[in-house]
Image: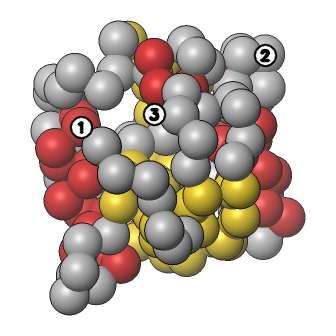
Amino acid sequence: MTEQRYPEPTVGALIFNAEGKLFLMSSHKWRGKWVVPGGHIELGERMEDALRREVKEETNLDIRDVEFVCFQEFIHDPRYWKRSHFIFFDFACRTDSTEVQLNDEAQDYVWVTLEEAGRLPVECYTTVAIERYLQKGRVDP
């Protein structure tokens, strides 16, 4: 593995189902905390395409109604399993899919209300994305 030379752009998805519940997954990469699915934007890939691909790879869910929420900087934060510098682009979206199939990046998942999410050990960058989503006046997805 080579040393990272530049910040890596990534996408993350606040996914809401037909009941308005948020999808969260626990990940060993985030020390077991609850996070949203997402990952790196590949060279030549549009952010929304990266979001759809990463969500499909990690959860098998198809998403729609994609809306930008916020961006965040992540610089060598020890909360992640390895030293990294990311720029997070967080989006909210919906899914009509019901069958979740996790890949090896996640160990478990839940569908929760935003209130229930507040009582879970949610990773801090995911918490910020949820708060920014709520600040935009989105309380009923």
The residue carrying pointer 2 sits among few (fewer than 14), some (14 to 19) or many (20 or more) residues within 10 Å by Cα, namely few
Which of the pair 14/33 is nearer the observer? 33
Is disc 1 surrounded by few (<14), some (14 to 19) or many (20+) residues within 10 Å?
Answer: many
Q: Amino acid at mark 2?
A: Arg
Q: Secondary structure at mark 2?
A: loop
- Looking at the picture, tell me which residue is in the foreground, 108 or 32: 32
What's the mark number on residue 58? 1
Mark 3 vs mark 1: give the one in front. Answer: 1
Above or below residue 131? Residue 11 is: below
* Residue for point 28% across, 84% down: 46
> In this rendering, which labeled residue sits more in front, label 1 or label 2?
1
Q: Is residue 16 left or right of residue 72?
A: left
Crowd band around label 3 with a 10 angstrom C-alpha radius: few (<14), some (14–19), many (20+): many
Q: Is residue 102 visible?
A: yes
Residue at the image position 27 percent from the left and 49 percent from the top: 55
Q: Is residue 43 left or right of residue 26?
A: left
Across and down, in percent, residue 68 comes to 55, 76
Q: Residue at x 69, y 48 (%)?
A: 76
Query: Which amino acid does the dot numbered 3 rest on?
Result: Phe
Q: CA distance from mark 3 to mark 1?
A: 12 Å
Q: For residue 119, which numbered disc appears in the image? A: 2
Earlier sequence position, callout 3 versus callout 1: 3
Say whether marks 3 and 2 touch (CB < 8 Å): no
Q: Quadrant of the N terminus?
A: top left
Task: Residue 129: give its label.
Answer: none
Residue displayed at 25% across by 53% down:
54
Q: Residue furthest right?
A: 135
Q: Amino acid at mark 1?
A: Glu
Query: Can you say whether 55 is above or below 121 in the image?
Result: below
* Left or right: 42 in relation to 85: left
| Quadrant where the C terminus is found in the figure | bottom right
